[in-house]
Amino acid sequence: GAGVSQSPSNKVTEKGKDVELRCDPISGHTALYWYRQRLGQGLEFLIYFQGNSAPDKSGLPSDRFSAERTGESVSTLTIQRTQQEDSAVYLCASSLVGSDTQYFGPGTRLTVL
Amino acid sequence: GENVEQHPSTLSVQEGDSAVIKCTYSDSASNYFPWYKQELGKGPQLIIDIRSNVGEKKDQRIAVTLNKTAKHFSLHITETQPEDSAVYFCAASIGGNFNKFYFGSGTKLNVKP
């Protein structure tokens, strides 16, 4: 079946602009996670969704970052007033309720000039 | 919070040799430890995982060991092949529903033919 998809695959933007990154989880996966991966580093947790609600936003780096999820499906991560330090690959993962296994999408590579 | 350290950062082996990657974690409450393989331009893919109630798990050429007392776990790849070349990440989590992973910084494995 279809895996987790993310769009766009690459995004180049200018400092100060807003960007929206999209994640389509595997159908039926209630849990959805966003991670950030800086060049040559591991994955940092940003936020997760349980259905459409986000019980844990502790990883969001600043109030410029926000995320929402609708219909227990697609999620959007928004970064306002982008800064160069926001440049990274943003990964989305989803999982079934009761399962530890997270399935990752291919990521969106964000470059802020 | 949890802190996961991973070593080495790079590992080069000859085809057919074994490769070992080690991780330590800090939170004794962590009880689920997955390993992910990330190929260039792709999202991480789960290759094996272990829970704290077992000390070792094998899947063909891949094995993971866990020492709860010492809070460390290792990935062992035997009979390495060029297609094993990738970045490998360990992670730790408390497990259960909607759990966030804490990732190591990654090991770039290069298998020379």
Image (cartoon, coloured by chain):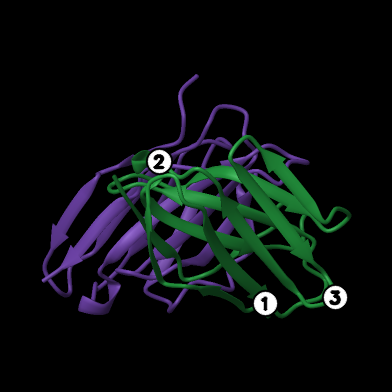
Mark 2 element type: loop
Look at the numbered discs 2 and 3 and tell me whether their residues touch, using CB distance below 8 Å. Answer: no
Front in this rendered view, residue A94 or B39:
B39
In the rendered view, does A59 fall on the left or right side of A106? right
Binning the other alpha carbons within 10 Å of mark 2 as few (below 14), some (14 to 19) or many (20 upward) gives some
Q: What chain letter is assigned to the residue under label 1?
A: B
> Which numbered circle lies on residue B81?
2
Residue B30: percent from left, percent from top: 77, 67
Residue A32 place in picture, x, y as percent = 57, 47
* Residue labelled with disc 1: B2
- How far is the residue under mark 2 from the one under mark 3? 33 Å
Rendering quarter of residue A16? bottom left
Residue drawn at point x = 62 percent, y = 34 percent? B60
Quadrant position of residue A78: bottom left
Q: Mark 3 points at which residue?
A: B69
Spatial CA span between label 1 and label 2 = 33 Å
Q: Identify the amino acid type marked 2.
A: Gln
Residue A90, above or below B7: above
